[in-house]
Amino acid sequence: MKQKSYDVIIIGAGASGLFCAFKAAERGREVLLLDHQSSPGQKITVSGGGRCNFTNMELDVSNYISQNPAFCFSALKRFSQFDCIRFFESLDLPYEERKLGQLFCTVSAEEIVKKLVDLCEQHKVEILLDCRIAQLQKHDMFSLQTNNGELKAESVVIATGGLSYKNLGASDFGMMVAKRFGINTIATQPALVPLTFNEMHANIFKMLSGISMSALLTVGKESFRDDLLFTHKGLSGPAILQVSSYVKKNSSIIINVLPDIDLFVYLKKNKADSPKAQLKTILAQLLPKRFVQLMCDNYIQSRCMQEYSDNMLQQITEQLQCWELKPTGNRGYGVAEATCGGVDTHELSSKTFESKKVAGLYFIGEVIDVTGQLGGYNLQWAWSSGYCCGQFV
């Protein structure tokens, strides 16, 4: 490819990049959208189990983690979940609402990518795939040295995402660009990721592998009610993925495996009604038998109900409704669904997403220090940030 100049080059053909591209092109901007992968929107295609959890009806700024919590308010207001729904309806993409306000497409997520690519092509966005960037500089214009030759633009948008989904080509390119131009970054860590535990707990969880149950998990001031899954490598499931984003060094997770009942009252009643029944028999009416057996083997001694004092029943209640565990780590970026940290939002305009230090350089999507909870919040952030940036770039 010969040297060519554009109004805008968008690096990263994921959710935010695709959205930003056709929005900028709608304004008559000459846009090049490039990606180092061989096909666009790969992360979209695997989201929501291939059905794409594209937004959430209950969306609020409190669903996002950032060193600058107010930053995301403007974009989420200008392109809200309701705007997103109307957009999907305009593309004839059918959807359904599932638990906790999550909206999923009822067609393949690949269909969403196809529709977004079609919009880009309709607005004459040039899409360049398998494009690797060796160098990005700015003089009068931005200059990109690539395997397709030199590319130039008045503006550059970094939409390269976070470090999660490495098998789909995730990289630290966006962070490196920020550092190259003297823009501050917030240290990253895996988010929405399964957690690991010490050897004793790991062995117990291994024996419980495959068991899933609804539970209430709390870390610090954050609580989540969802499914908890025991695995060969630790704990997973939506509830664990949610709390993982808030786990710090030496954090404890409090697990309530019976959040819908007053267990102490329940046990006292069974002691009165069935004094000779074994504790494990009573608990097995509420919880999976294998879980009950392991808990009785490792944490709670099973006896006849009549042998327990009120104080002992209270201790059993606390064990099951205030089960405290300390993670030793997590499964890493390879299985994480998102990345905490990224480009410091104090360095960006919340209206345009332009760098305050480098005119014409923009950052959108997951590369920024804005991380959503599980449930469609991260894709909504991609759409919102892409939409807003596309109005100005």
Image (cartoon, rainbow, N blue to C red):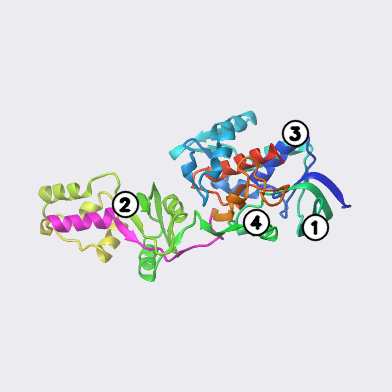
Task: Judge by depth and name the residue closer to the eye, 168 or 162.
Answer: 162
Position of residue 269 relative to residue 181, above or below, is above
Label 3 Cα neighbours within 10 Å, binned few <14 / some 14-19 / many ≥20 = few
Question: Of the residues tagged 1 and 4, which is closer to the observer?
Answer: 4
Residue sticking out furthest to the right: 2
* Residue stretch in magenta: 310-337
Residue type indicated by callout 3 = Arg
Mark 4 or mark 2: whose residue is earlier in sequence: 4
The residue to which callout 4 is attached is 183
Q: Is residue 51 visible?
A: no
Where's residue 108, x and y in %?
Answer: 60, 41
Q: Residue at x 77, y 57 (%)?
A: 137
Q: Is residue 61 visible?
A: yes
Q: Marks 3 and 2, how far apart in space?
A: 53 Å
Q: What is the quadrant of residue 167 in the picture?
A: bottom right
Label 4 Cα neighbours within 10 Å, binned few <14 / some 14-19 / many ≥20 = many
The local secondary structure at tag 3 comes to loop
Label 1 Cα neighbours within 10 Å, binned few <14 / some 14-19 / many ≥20 = some
Q: Marks 1 and 4, how far apart in space?
A: 23 Å
The local secondary structure at tag 2 comes to loop
Q: Circles 4 and 2: CB distance less than 8 Å?
A: no
Q: Marks 3 and 1, how far apart in space?
A: 27 Å
Circle number at residue 146:
1
Q: What is the quadrant of residue 254 in the picture?
A: bottom left
Residue type indicated by callout 1 = Thr
The residue to which callout 3 is attached is 27
